[in-house]
Amino acid sequence: MLWSDPPEEPPEELREVQAMLRRAGFVLAIGVVALFVLLGLSP
């Protein structure tokens, strides 16, 4: 890797989208777990 090569980090927009998708996935996973718990507790 040469010193003149561009940095390997993704652009700012891509990092923002990745962070948003990570948060959305986390919220979705918690929602699914909560749904299964509620369905399991119902008679």
Image: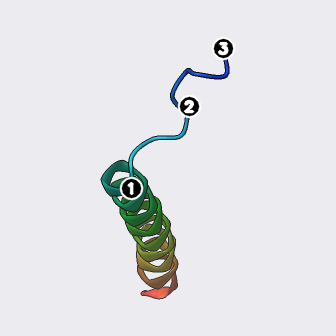
Residue ID for mark 2: 8
Residue ID for mark 1: 12
Task: Judge left or right: residue 43 versus residue 17.
Answer: right
Instruction: Check the image and tell me how it is coloured.
Output: rainbow
* Residue 4 badge: none
Q: Residue at x 66, y 14 (%)?
A: 2
Q: Residue at x 55, y 21 (%)?
A: 5
Q: Quadrant of residue 20?
A: bottom left
The amino acid sitting under disc 3 is Leu
The amino acid sitting under disc 2 is Glu
Q: Position of residue 16 (x, y in %)?
A: 38, 61
The amino acid sitting under disc 1 is Glu
Question: Where the N terminus falls, by quadrant?
Answer: top right
* Residue 2 badge: 3
- Bin the neighbour count of mark 2 within 10 Å (Cα to Cα): few under 14, some 14-19, many 20 and up: few
Q: Nearer the viewer, mark 2 or mark 3?
A: 3
